[in-house]
Amino acid sequence: MAREQWGTRAGFILAAIGSAVGLGNIWRFPYVAYENGGGAFFLPYLFALLTAGIPLLIMEFTLGHKYRGSAPLSYARLHKKAEWIGWWQVAIAFVISTYYAVIIAWAIAYTYFAFNQSWGEDTGGFLMGEYLQRIDLSGGALGEVGSLVPGVFIPLLVVWAVTLGVLFKGVKRGIEMANRIFIPLLVVMFLLIVIRAITLEGALVGLDAFFAPNWSEIMSPGVWVAAYGQIFFSLSIAFAIMITYSSYLGKKSDINNNAFITGFSNSSFELLAGIGVFAALGFMATASGVGVDEVASAGIGLAFVVFPEIINTFPGMNGFFGVLFFGSLVLAGLSSLISIVETFVAGIQDKFKLSRTKAVAFGGGLSAVISLLFATQGGLFFLDTADYFINQFGVALAGLVSVIAVSWFIRKLPELQGHANGVSDFKTGLWWKVCLSIITPIVLGYMAIQNTITNITSNYEDYPTSLVVSWGWVVAIGAIVIGFVFASFKWQKNDLDVPADSNDKGADL
């Protein structure tokens, strides 16, 4: 069966950017930059992009394009003993899809709440109490599931209906078409947010806090690790997405250029998000008579507590500003979720010869059912724990293992570089191999050691050991086990033969 292909190069690039640009660009990057030297952070950030982000993107684009398969099939064709890495990455993507969908559901609900600021004055109390109906912790109920929360369940159905509906349509008519709508709309909406935010009283105070360089921080190893971590987690690297997406490319695909476009587009949006977020935080700090440091936060707190507070005091058309902000979260989340689910849809299609319809129904349906656990009263704690561990001991560790396997053990970097250079307008040289064989393994290795020490010596967020083990360590280790289990299934005859001319049939991209 001929492999599906993108209709145009722009379609692929928009899909890759759509995957990379997610919730973390909006609610994580601005705070990470602010906490790690402000304007000075951009130096290690740019260095990390050029020495880890783009080189890894080139490697994954090349793996998918050369071996013409999902992550498991591409790794199996690279070397039969490397297949488990592909399945490990697919398992990581599966875990992320189950809770990522729930956060998008929150954003949908808050888009509706924004019309009349239904969250009231106590935005934190509203989020935890009235909306999420978080279980009462006074009785030691942390770790209990509780009942399903209707306010989360209903928009969650919408999230899965849209995601699976797009995936049922396939690569060209589904994923490509959706990103052609989502990404331009997302950029326009966030540009409107930025334009309005920088005209607010106090915006310059926020922007000064964001951009003012603290050069003394540059010498701190923690700042450089933070820069590499942000690049790594924001580019959709090491959980099978970019390998899968690039497997749908045509023969002349300019892999190197596509990686640079994707990497810099993602970083540009992060910078745009930083400007919009900190201009708004400067307004809030000025209005409240406090410093920016007292209102700055990241993650769920920034999106669903701090921003509703900002919207409450917004001068004129605050409902419209709120709809723009939470609508942006929805679009950024959906484009990423579609790419995440596509990884395991493609994986089971390749391995078990299922039709796309059956693969989407089985893989996506199973993820949707499991996501209901995170839509319960205890779901927030499960989500927080699973997210932390699958990123720190899933995505980051899988990236370390994959780059070491390819560069040190299988020793395929020269061959992959030759393939990428052969289809690209410009060629990479020694820089690419040095980055992947030396710089990236050292940084990711250091991160892995530090994370392991930290999490062995103390529980994440001081959560009970039972919660950390069952929703953290078990989830992270379970993804590795699943990798080996699925790799143990035999391929059909000739499945591991690399199609010699299969990519000649598509359009040059």
Image: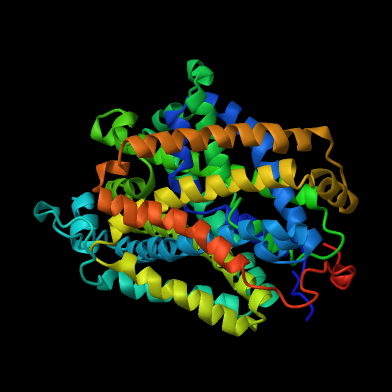
Q: How is the image coloured?
A: rainbow
Relative vertical location of residue 108 with respect to residue 492 in this rendering, above or below: above
x then y, percent, for residue 72: 66, 64
x then y, percent, for residue 286: 30, 32
Between residue 170 and residue 314, name the one nearer to us: 170
Left or right: where does residue 443 sit relative to residue 506?
left
To which quarter of the image does residue 484 belong? bottom right
x then y, percent, for residue 49: 64, 37
Left or right: where does residue 9 sit relative to residue 144?
right
Between residue 351 and residue 20, name the one nearer to us: 351
Q: Residue at x 65, y 48 (%)?
A: 402
Between residue 470 and residue 136, name the one nearer to us: 470
Query: Is residue 315 in view from this perspective?
Result: no
Q: Residue at x 58, y 84 (%)?
A: 358
Query: Which quadrant does the N terminus fall into?
Result: bottom right
Q: Residue at x 45, y 27 (%)?
A: 208
To which quarter of the image does residue 81 belong? bottom right
Q: Residue at x 38, y 69 (%)?
A: 371
